[in-house]
Amino acid sequence: MDFYRVMVSFGKRKLFACGCLAEMINYNRTSCPSCGIEWAMPDHNKLFNDKSWNMKIYMSRDHYADFIASDLPGSGIVSEHAKKILMENFNNTIDFGNIEMISFRNLTDQKLKEIRDDFGYAAVKKIPNDPPQYYRMLLKQGADLDFEKSNIKLILDCHKCGRKNYDRPRDTGTSSNIYIIESTWKYYDLFHVEGKGNTIFCSERFIDIYDQNKLTGLEFEKVQTVR
């Protein structure tokens, strides 16, 4: 079995829309009495596993792909059409969380000012009214990495706060140093692996279904397999 790293495409001749957060994500600073590490992050479970969280996004333009990039790497945002295809073919692999789609007319004056200050007036003018519905994919851990071959070391595993830290090579955008252990694969066709953050991986079957249904917005790069 071959596996692939899943990457969002921003479009070639015409840029695809991105999903931009319309709300602030609270980063809470936590100090663990066991490991002594003080760190700030949002509730990871809320971001990537909680179905009930109603993530709010606006679209950066009106050229829509089935899979889109967002301000939250690895959040896996998909169109209604893609959701239907995924549910028909991968119902043991993927669950979905809601997204509240925010149109231009619903953005507050303060938010519009922030967008103008950060990206200019042109960016504000591209925000569409009545964007199509998108959903968050909720994925499982589907296989193990060969940490040694992938040059990844687990340097902190706190059983009190659950924090894990890894020493790993800087992500260069290539998959030449990613080794998945085939025997650990749980037969999920779209999945995460421990040690690679929120990077999404897929099977050959996922790419076949993606191509057959002419879905848009993704690129794939083959990773190494330990048999």
Image (cartoon, rainbow, N blue to C red):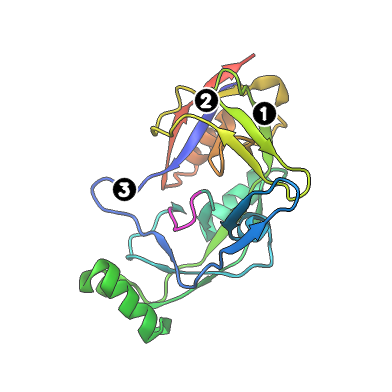
Please give the residue where the numbered disc 1 appears in the rendered image.
144
Query: Mark 2 or 3 closer to N-term?
Result: 3
Mark 1 residue crowding within 10 angstroms, few (<14) / some (14–19) / many (20+): some
Residue 191 seen: no
Between 47 and 9, the residue placed more toward the observer is 47
Label 3: element kind: loop
Which span of residues is magenta-colored? 69-73
The CA span between labels 1 and 2 is: 11 Å
Residue 46 included in the magenta stretch of the image: no
The part of the image, by quadrant, that contains residue 96 is bottom right
Q: Are the residues tagged 2 and 3 within 8 Å (C-beta)?
A: no
Give the residue at mark 2. 178
Q: Read off the residue under disc 3.
A: 11
Apparent side of residue 39 relative to residue 223 in the rendered image (left or right): right
Of labels 1 and 3, earlier in sequence is 3
Name the foreground residue: 216 vs 202: 202
| Image x and y of residue 58, in percent | 42, 70
